Image (tube, helix red, strand yellow):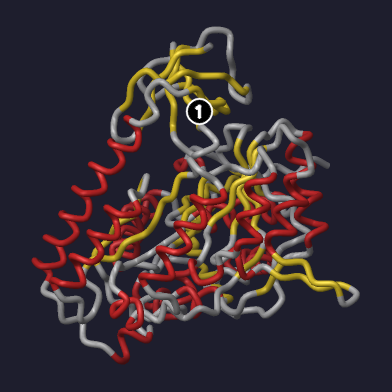
Protein backbone atom coordinates (compact mmCIF):
# COMPACT_ATOMS: atom_id res chain seq x y z
CA UNK A 1 0.00 0.00 0.00
CA UNK A 2 1.40 3.37 -1.04
CA UNK A 3 1.06 6.02 1.69
CA UNK A 4 0.56 9.52 0.36
CA UNK A 5 3.12 11.74 2.02
CA UNK A 6 2.19 14.94 3.77
CA UNK A 7 3.95 18.10 2.69
CA UNK A 8 6.20 20.14 4.95
CA UNK A 9 7.32 23.70 4.22
CA UNK A 10 10.42 24.75 6.18
CA UNK A 11 11.26 28.44 6.47
CA UNK A 12 14.72 29.23 7.82
CA UNK A 13 15.93 32.37 9.58
CA UNK A 14 19.41 33.36 10.69
CA UNK A 15 22.78 31.73 10.23
CA UNK A 16 24.17 28.91 8.08
CA UNK A 17 23.86 26.58 11.08
CA UNK A 18 20.09 27.02 10.90
CA UNK A 19 20.02 26.13 7.20
CA UNK A 20 22.01 22.99 8.00
CA UNK A 21 19.56 22.16 10.80
CA UNK A 22 16.59 22.63 8.45
CA UNK A 23 18.12 20.03 6.13
CA UNK A 24 18.44 17.63 9.09
CA UNK A 25 14.78 18.24 9.96
CA UNK A 26 13.79 17.58 6.34
CA UNK A 27 15.62 14.25 6.41
CA UNK A 28 14.01 13.15 9.69
CA UNK A 29 10.52 13.98 8.46
CA UNK A 30 11.12 12.37 5.07
CA UNK A 31 11.55 9.06 6.90
CA UNK A 32 8.12 9.57 8.51
CA UNK A 33 5.70 10.20 5.65
CA UNK A 34 6.53 13.85 4.96
CA UNK A 35 8.13 15.39 1.91
CA UNK A 36 9.51 18.93 1.53
CA UNK A 37 7.59 21.45 -0.58
CA UNK A 38 8.44 24.93 -1.78
CA UNK A 39 4.74 25.85 -1.94
CA UNK A 40 3.69 27.07 1.49
CA UNK A 41 0.00 27.07 0.59
CA UNK A 42 0.16 23.37 -0.30
CA UNK A 43 1.78 22.43 3.02
CA UNK A 44 0.21 20.28 5.72
CA UNK A 45 2.93 21.39 8.11
CA UNK A 46 4.82 24.70 8.25
CA UNK A 47 8.00 24.81 10.33
CA UNK A 48 9.90 28.00 11.08
CA UNK A 49 13.53 27.48 12.06
CA UNK A 50 14.36 30.55 14.10
CA UNK A 51 17.25 32.68 15.35
CA UNK A 52 17.48 34.56 18.66
CA UNK A 53 20.79 36.32 18.25
CA UNK A 54 19.13 39.74 17.77
CA UNK A 55 15.76 41.12 18.73
CA UNK A 56 14.89 42.12 15.16
CA UNK A 57 15.35 38.47 14.10
CA UNK A 58 12.70 37.44 16.63
CA UNK A 59 10.40 40.29 15.60
CA UNK A 60 10.56 39.09 11.99
CA UNK A 61 9.39 35.67 13.17
CA UNK A 62 6.56 37.21 15.22
CA UNK A 63 5.40 39.14 12.17
CA UNK A 64 5.54 36.00 10.06
CA UNK A 65 3.52 34.08 12.65
CA UNK A 66 0.75 36.67 12.35
CA UNK A 67 0.67 36.06 8.60
CA UNK A 68 0.52 32.31 9.14
CA UNK A 69 -2.35 32.73 11.59
CA UNK A 70 -4.58 33.96 8.77
CA UNK A 71 -3.47 31.00 6.64
CA UNK A 72 -4.42 28.62 9.43
CA UNK A 73 -7.87 30.18 9.77
CA UNK A 74 -8.48 29.18 6.15
CA UNK A 75 -7.11 25.67 6.69
CA UNK A 76 -7.95 24.15 10.07
CA UNK A 77 -5.84 21.06 9.41
CA UNK A 78 -2.65 23.09 8.90
CA UNK A 79 -0.04 22.53 11.62
CA UNK A 80 2.53 25.20 12.55
CA UNK A 81 5.74 24.59 14.46
CA UNK A 82 8.61 26.72 15.70
CA UNK A 83 12.12 25.27 15.75
CA UNK A 84 15.56 26.44 16.77
CA UNK A 85 17.00 29.06 19.09
CA UNK A 86 13.87 31.17 19.58
CA UNK A 87 11.94 28.03 20.45
CA UNK A 88 14.65 27.07 22.94
CA UNK A 89 14.84 30.53 24.51
CA UNK A 90 11.10 31.15 25.00
CA UNK A 91 9.83 27.57 25.38
CA UNK A 92 6.28 27.32 26.81
CA UNK A 93 5.90 31.11 26.74
CA UNK A 94 5.56 30.91 22.96
CA UNK A 95 2.66 28.47 23.21
CA UNK A 96 0.90 30.91 25.54
CA UNK A 97 1.56 33.99 23.40
CA UNK A 98 1.08 32.46 19.94
CA UNK A 99 -2.07 30.34 20.29
CA UNK A 100 -1.94 29.03 16.71
CA UNK A 101 1.47 27.35 17.22
CA UNK A 102 1.13 23.59 17.57
CA UNK A 103 4.64 22.54 18.50
CA UNK A 104 7.91 23.97 19.85
CA UNK A 105 11.20 22.14 19.28
CA UNK A 106 14.69 23.24 20.31
CA UNK A 107 17.89 22.53 18.33
CA UNK A 108 18.55 19.21 20.08
CA UNK A 109 15.01 17.85 19.82
CA UNK A 110 14.61 17.23 16.11
CA UNK A 111 14.70 13.43 16.36
CA UNK A 112 11.50 13.63 18.44
CA UNK A 113 9.58 15.48 15.71
CA UNK A 114 7.66 12.40 14.43
CA UNK A 115 6.40 11.59 17.95
CA UNK A 116 5.59 15.23 18.67
CA UNK A 117 3.60 15.45 15.44
CA UNK A 118 1.60 12.37 16.46
CA UNK A 119 0.79 14.24 19.67
CA UNK A 120 -0.29 17.28 17.64
CA UNK A 121 -2.47 15.09 15.40
CA UNK A 122 -4.27 13.88 18.52
CA UNK A 123 -5.23 17.47 19.31
CA UNK A 124 -2.54 18.39 21.84
CA UNK A 125 0.24 20.96 21.82
CA UNK A 126 3.75 19.46 21.80
CA UNK A 127 7.12 20.70 23.04
CA UNK A 128 10.71 19.44 23.37
CA UNK A 129 13.35 21.97 24.39
CA UNK A 130 15.73 19.65 26.24
CA UNK A 131 19.38 20.38 25.52
CA UNK A 132 21.76 17.49 24.91
CA UNK A 133 25.43 16.94 25.73
CA UNK A 134 26.02 14.47 22.90
CA UNK A 135 23.53 15.03 20.04
CA UNK A 136 25.29 15.81 16.74
CA UNK A 137 22.87 14.21 14.21
CA UNK A 138 25.96 12.51 12.75
CA UNK A 139 24.02 9.53 11.38
CA UNK A 140 21.45 11.62 9.49
CA UNK A 141 21.89 12.30 5.79
CA UNK A 142 20.44 15.81 5.38
CA UNK A 143 17.91 16.64 2.67
CA UNK A 144 19.44 19.43 0.57
CA UNK A 145 16.56 21.89 0.69
CA UNK A 146 16.49 24.38 -2.18
CA UNK A 147 19.97 23.27 -3.18
CA UNK A 148 21.66 24.46 -6.36
CA UNK A 149 23.46 21.11 -6.52
CA UNK A 150 26.86 22.81 -6.20
CA UNK A 151 27.19 24.06 -2.60
CA UNK A 152 26.42 22.13 0.58
CA UNK A 153 26.75 22.64 4.33
CA UNK A 154 28.20 20.04 6.68
CA UNK A 155 27.72 20.54 10.41
CA UNK A 156 30.87 19.36 12.23
CA UNK A 157 29.95 20.35 15.78
CA UNK A 158 27.17 21.86 17.84
CA UNK A 159 26.91 24.22 20.78
CA UNK A 160 29.18 26.92 22.18
CA UNK A 161 30.98 27.53 25.48
CA UNK A 162 32.51 30.95 24.85
CA UNK A 163 29.77 32.86 26.71
CA UNK A 164 30.33 36.21 25.00
CA UNK A 165 28.47 38.77 27.10
CA UNK A 166 25.96 39.70 24.38
CA UNK A 167 25.21 36.23 22.99
CA UNK A 168 22.36 33.77 23.64
CA UNK A 169 23.86 30.86 21.69
CA UNK A 170 25.39 28.98 24.66
CA UNK A 171 21.97 29.04 26.31
CA UNK A 172 19.99 28.02 23.21
CA UNK A 173 22.40 25.48 21.67
CA UNK A 174 24.09 24.06 24.74
CA UNK A 175 27.59 22.71 25.31
CA UNK A 176 30.13 22.13 22.58
CA UNK A 177 30.28 18.63 21.16
CA UNK A 178 32.14 17.52 18.07
CA UNK A 179 31.00 15.05 15.46
CA UNK A 180 32.86 11.86 14.55
CA UNK A 181 35.33 12.83 11.78
CA UNK A 182 34.66 9.62 9.85
CA UNK A 183 31.00 10.60 9.43
CA UNK A 184 32.03 14.07 8.24
CA UNK A 185 34.44 12.73 5.62
CA UNK A 186 31.85 10.16 4.47
CA UNK A 187 29.28 12.92 4.04
CA UNK A 188 31.72 15.06 2.06
CA UNK A 189 32.64 12.09 -0.17
CA UNK A 190 28.99 11.26 -0.76
CA UNK A 191 28.14 14.84 -1.65
CA UNK A 192 31.04 15.01 -4.09
CA UNK A 193 29.84 11.81 -5.78
CA UNK A 194 26.37 13.39 -6.08
CA UNK A 195 27.89 16.33 -7.99
CA UNK A 196 28.37 18.89 -5.24
CA UNK A 197 31.65 20.76 -5.62
CA UNK A 198 31.84 22.98 -2.55
CA UNK A 199 31.39 22.11 1.13
CA UNK A 200 31.21 24.55 4.04
CA UNK A 201 32.10 23.01 7.39
CA UNK A 202 29.93 24.60 10.07
CA UNK A 203 30.26 25.21 13.79
CA UNK A 204 29.67 28.07 16.21
CA UNK A 205 33.46 28.04 16.61
CA UNK A 206 35.06 25.52 14.27
CA UNK A 207 38.46 26.11 15.90
CA UNK A 208 37.12 24.33 19.01
CA UNK A 209 36.52 21.10 17.08
CA UNK A 210 38.15 18.16 18.85
CA UNK A 211 37.65 14.41 18.55
CA UNK A 212 39.60 11.81 20.47
CA UNK A 213 39.77 8.13 19.62
CA UNK A 214 42.12 5.54 21.15
CA UNK A 215 43.91 8.37 22.93
CA UNK A 216 44.68 10.18 19.65
CA UNK A 217 43.19 13.68 19.33
CA UNK A 218 42.06 15.22 16.05
CA UNK A 219 41.58 18.98 16.04
CA UNK A 220 40.17 21.25 13.35
CA UNK A 221 43.31 21.63 11.19
CA UNK A 222 43.51 17.83 10.91
CA UNK A 223 39.81 17.49 10.10
CA UNK A 224 40.05 20.21 7.45
CA UNK A 225 42.98 18.39 5.86
CA UNK A 226 41.03 15.10 5.77
CA UNK A 227 38.07 16.75 4.02
CA UNK A 228 40.38 18.51 1.54
CA UNK A 229 41.85 15.13 0.62
CA UNK A 230 38.45 13.78 -0.48
CA UNK A 231 39.12 15.15 -3.97
CA UNK A 232 41.25 18.03 -5.28
CA UNK A 233 38.19 19.28 -7.24
CA UNK A 234 36.21 19.65 -4.03
CA UNK A 235 36.35 23.16 -2.63
CA UNK A 236 36.27 23.38 1.16
CA UNK A 237 35.19 26.37 3.25
CA UNK A 238 34.40 26.77 6.94
CA UNK A 239 32.55 29.09 9.30
CA UNK A 240 33.08 30.48 11.84
CA UNK A 241 36.51 31.07 13.39
CA UNK A 242 36.93 32.67 16.81
CA UNK A 243 39.97 34.99 16.82
CA UNK A 244 41.23 33.67 20.16
CA UNK A 245 41.54 30.15 18.71
CA UNK A 246 42.78 30.82 15.16
CA UNK A 247 46.03 28.84 15.09
CA UNK A 248 49.05 28.92 12.82
CA UNK A 249 48.51 25.16 12.33
CA UNK A 250 45.18 25.94 10.65
CA UNK A 251 46.76 28.61 8.44
CA UNK A 252 49.49 26.17 7.36
CA UNK A 253 46.89 23.59 6.30
CA UNK A 254 44.91 26.25 4.41
CA UNK A 255 48.03 27.42 2.59
CA UNK A 256 49.06 23.85 1.73
CA UNK A 257 45.87 22.72 -0.04
CA UNK A 258 44.76 24.70 -3.13
CA UNK A 259 41.19 23.43 -2.76
CA UNK A 260 40.80 24.92 0.74
CA UNK A 261 39.32 28.32 -0.01
CA UNK A 262 41.39 31.36 0.80
CA UNK A 263 38.78 33.22 2.79
CA UNK A 264 38.33 33.51 6.56
CA UNK A 265 35.40 34.90 8.49
CA UNK A 266 36.95 36.33 11.66
CA UNK A 267 34.42 38.27 13.77
CA UNK A 268 36.08 41.19 15.57
CA UNK A 269 32.90 42.75 17.09
CA UNK A 270 34.82 45.85 18.29
CA UNK A 271 38.16 47.53 17.66
CA UNK A 272 38.50 48.59 21.30
CA UNK A 273 40.31 46.30 23.75
CA UNK A 274 38.28 47.79 26.58
CA UNK A 275 34.98 46.92 24.89
CA UNK A 276 36.27 43.48 23.88
CA UNK A 277 36.99 42.78 27.56
CA UNK A 278 33.44 43.85 28.48
CA UNK A 279 32.17 41.54 25.74
CA UNK A 280 34.16 38.61 27.20
CA UNK A 281 35.77 37.98 23.82
CA UNK A 282 39.06 36.85 25.43
CA UNK A 283 41.35 38.66 23.02
CA UNK A 284 42.57 42.23 22.57
CA UNK A 285 42.77 44.57 19.62
CA UNK A 286 46.48 43.74 19.38
CA UNK A 287 45.84 39.98 19.39
CA UNK A 288 43.30 40.34 16.61
CA UNK A 289 45.69 42.44 14.51
CA UNK A 290 48.45 39.86 14.97
CA UNK A 291 46.08 37.12 13.72
CA UNK A 292 45.24 39.20 10.64
CA UNK A 293 48.94 39.67 9.98
CA UNK A 294 49.46 35.91 10.31
CA UNK A 295 46.71 35.22 7.77
CA UNK A 296 48.35 37.57 5.30
CA UNK A 297 51.78 36.14 6.00
CA UNK A 298 50.72 32.57 5.23
CA UNK A 299 48.18 33.40 2.50
CA UNK A 300 48.70 36.68 0.67
CA UNK A 301 45.44 37.55 -1.07
CA UNK A 302 43.23 35.69 1.42
CA UNK A 303 40.04 37.66 2.01
CA UNK A 304 38.96 38.46 5.57
CA UNK A 305 35.37 39.17 6.54
CA UNK A 306 34.04 40.06 9.96
CA UNK A 307 31.16 40.91 12.31
CA UNK A 308 30.88 44.30 14.03
CA UNK A 309 28.53 45.43 16.80
CA UNK A 310 27.84 49.16 17.13
CA UNK A 311 26.89 50.65 20.49
CA UNK A 312 27.66 47.85 22.94
CA UNK A 313 27.18 48.68 26.62
CA UNK A 314 29.54 51.44 27.75
CA UNK A 315 30.96 52.05 24.28
CA UNK A 316 32.37 55.59 24.08
CA UNK A 317 33.00 57.70 21.02
CA UNK A 318 36.69 56.87 21.41
CA UNK A 319 35.88 53.13 21.36
CA UNK A 320 33.84 53.65 18.20
CA UNK A 321 36.72 55.47 16.54
CA UNK A 322 39.00 52.55 17.43
CA UNK A 323 36.62 50.24 15.59
CA UNK A 324 36.71 52.47 12.51
CA UNK A 325 40.52 52.65 12.61
CA UNK A 326 40.80 48.87 12.89
CA UNK A 327 38.46 48.49 9.93
CA UNK A 328 40.68 50.80 7.86
CA UNK A 329 43.80 48.93 8.94
CA UNK A 330 42.37 45.46 8.25
CA UNK A 331 40.62 46.56 5.02
CA UNK A 332 37.89 43.95 5.52
CA UNK A 333 36.42 42.60 2.31
CA UNK A 334 32.93 42.39 3.83
CA UNK A 335 31.29 42.76 7.22
CA UNK A 336 28.03 41.87 8.94
CA UNK A 337 27.22 45.02 10.89
CA UNK A 338 24.57 45.47 13.59
CA UNK A 339 23.45 47.71 16.41
CA UNK A 340 23.76 46.13 19.83
CA UNK A 341 20.53 44.43 20.81
CA UNK A 342 20.20 43.37 24.44
CA UNK A 343 19.19 39.72 24.73
CA UNK A 344 17.44 38.48 27.89
CA UNK A 345 19.45 36.37 30.37
CA UNK A 346 22.82 37.06 28.76
CA UNK A 347 25.73 38.29 30.86
CA UNK A 348 25.39 41.78 29.41
CA UNK A 349 21.69 41.93 30.27
CA UNK A 350 22.42 40.87 33.86
CA UNK A 351 25.54 42.96 34.55
CA UNK A 352 25.62 45.97 32.23
CA UNK A 353 23.42 48.89 31.41
CA UNK A 354 22.36 49.25 27.77
CA UNK A 355 23.43 52.88 28.04
CA UNK A 356 24.25 53.95 24.49
CA UNK A 357 21.36 56.02 23.14
CA UNK A 358 19.51 54.50 20.19
CA UNK A 359 20.24 57.49 17.95
CA UNK A 360 23.95 57.21 18.80
CA UNK A 361 23.91 53.48 17.96
CA UNK A 362 22.23 54.28 14.65
CA UNK A 363 24.72 57.00 13.76
CA UNK A 364 27.71 54.81 14.64
CA UNK A 365 26.28 51.92 12.62
CA UNK A 366 25.76 54.21 9.63
CA UNK A 367 29.40 55.28 9.83
CA UNK A 368 30.55 51.66 10.05
CA UNK A 369 28.41 50.69 7.05
CA UNK A 370 29.61 53.65 4.96
CA UNK A 371 33.25 52.82 5.70
CA UNK A 372 32.77 49.15 4.88
CA UNK A 373 31.11 50.00 1.58
CA UNK A 374 34.21 52.03 0.66
CA UNK A 375 36.53 49.22 1.77
CA UNK A 376 34.59 46.57 -0.18
CA UNK A 377 34.59 48.66 -3.35
CA UNK A 378 38.29 49.45 -2.99
CA UNK A 379 39.10 45.76 -2.48
CA UNK A 380 37.10 44.73 -5.53
CA UNK A 381 38.75 47.37 -7.70
CA UNK A 382 42.13 45.84 -6.87
CA UNK A 383 40.93 42.61 -8.50
CA UNK A 384 40.33 44.26 -11.89
CA UNK A 385 42.75 42.80 -14.42
CA UNK A 386 43.39 39.67 -12.36
CA UNK A 387 42.47 36.11 -13.33
CA UNK A 388 40.51 33.81 -11.00
CA UNK A 389 39.17 30.28 -11.09
CA UNK A 390 35.43 30.60 -10.51
CA UNK A 391 33.12 27.78 -9.43
CA UNK A 392 29.85 28.37 -11.28
CA UNK A 393 26.78 28.27 -9.02
CA UNK A 394 23.84 29.37 -11.16
CA UNK A 395 22.24 32.00 -13.36
CA UNK A 396 22.56 35.69 -12.62
CA UNK A 397 19.42 37.23 -11.12
CA UNK A 398 19.48 39.94 -13.79
CA UNK A 399 19.92 37.87 -16.92
CA UNK A 400 19.62 34.24 -17.99
CA UNK A 401 22.45 34.98 -20.43
CA UNK A 402 24.86 35.37 -17.50
CA UNK A 403 26.10 32.98 -14.86
CA UNK A 404 27.51 33.72 -11.44
CA UNK A 405 29.99 31.90 -9.27
CA UNK A 406 32.55 32.50 -6.56
CA UNK A 407 36.29 32.74 -6.38
CA UNK A 408 38.26 30.85 -3.77
CA UNK A 409 38.26 34.19 -1.93
CA UNK A 410 34.43 33.99 -1.73
CA UNK A 411 33.81 36.92 -4.07
CA UNK A 412 30.82 36.72 -6.42
CA UNK A 413 31.66 36.98 -10.13
CA UNK A 414 29.14 37.49 -12.96
CA UNK A 415 30.10 36.48 -16.51
CA UNK A 416 28.55 35.52 -19.86
CA UNK A 417 27.11 32.00 -19.89
CA UNK A 418 28.68 30.69 -23.06
CA UNK A 419 28.74 26.87 -22.90
CA UNK A 420 29.25 26.71 -19.14
CA UNK A 421 26.85 25.33 -16.55
CA UNK A 422 26.56 25.22 -12.74
CA UNK A 423 29.30 23.09 -11.21
CA UNK A 424 31.89 24.02 -13.83
CA UNK A 425 35.20 25.63 -12.93
CA UNK A 426 35.81 28.58 -15.24
CA UNK A 427 38.86 30.79 -15.66
CA UNK A 428 37.70 34.42 -15.50
CA UNK A 429 39.49 37.72 -16.02
CA UNK A 430 37.96 40.53 -13.98
CA UNK A 431 37.13 43.64 -15.99
CA UNK A 432 34.69 45.51 -13.75
CA UNK A 433 33.08 45.58 -10.32
CA UNK A 434 30.64 47.08 -7.89
CA UNK A 435 31.01 47.07 -4.11
CA UNK A 436 29.37 43.64 -3.92
CA UNK A 437 30.14 41.90 -7.22
CA UNK A 438 32.98 41.32 -9.66
CA UNK A 439 32.36 41.18 -13.41
CA UNK A 440 34.52 39.29 -15.85
CA UNK A 441 35.08 37.50 -19.12
CA UNK A 442 35.90 33.83 -19.73
CA UNK A 443 39.44 33.05 -20.82
Pinpoint residue 178: horizontal percent, then vertical percent. Answer: 70, 69
Q: Is residue 396 left or right of residue 372?
A: right
Q: Residues within 10 Å of mark 1 (few under 14, many from 20)?
A: many
Residue occupying the point 59% across, 17% down: 421
Question: Horizontal and vertical percent for residue 38?
Answer: 51, 38
Give the residue at x 50% y 32%. 406
User: In the depicted view, which residue is nearer to us: 76 or 19?
Assistant: 19
Residue situated furthest front in the rendering: 297
Residue 89 in the image: above or below residue 46: below
Left or right: 193 in relation to 221: right
Location of the N terminus by quadrant is: top right
Q: Disc 1 marks which residue?
A: 405
Q: Quadrant of residue 250?
A: bottom right
Q: Secondary structure at mark 1?
A: strand
Horizontal relation, residue 385 to residue 373: left or right: right
Residue farthest toward the right in the current orientation of the protein = 214
Residue at (52, 73) in percent of width and height: 125
Tell me the quarter of the picture where residue 211 sits: bottom right
Amino acid sequence: MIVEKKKVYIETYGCQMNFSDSEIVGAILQEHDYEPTIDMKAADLILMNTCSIRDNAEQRVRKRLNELHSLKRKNNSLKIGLLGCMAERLKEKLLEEEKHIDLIVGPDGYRSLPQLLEQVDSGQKAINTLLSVDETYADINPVRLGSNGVNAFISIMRGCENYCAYCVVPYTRGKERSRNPNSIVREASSLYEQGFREMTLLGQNVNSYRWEENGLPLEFPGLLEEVARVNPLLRVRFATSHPKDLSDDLLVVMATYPNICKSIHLPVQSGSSRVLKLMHRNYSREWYMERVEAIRRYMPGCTITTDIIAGFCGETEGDHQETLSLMRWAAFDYAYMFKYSERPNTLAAKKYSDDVAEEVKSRRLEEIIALQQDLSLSGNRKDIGKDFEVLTEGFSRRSMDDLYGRTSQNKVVVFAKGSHKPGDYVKIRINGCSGATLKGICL
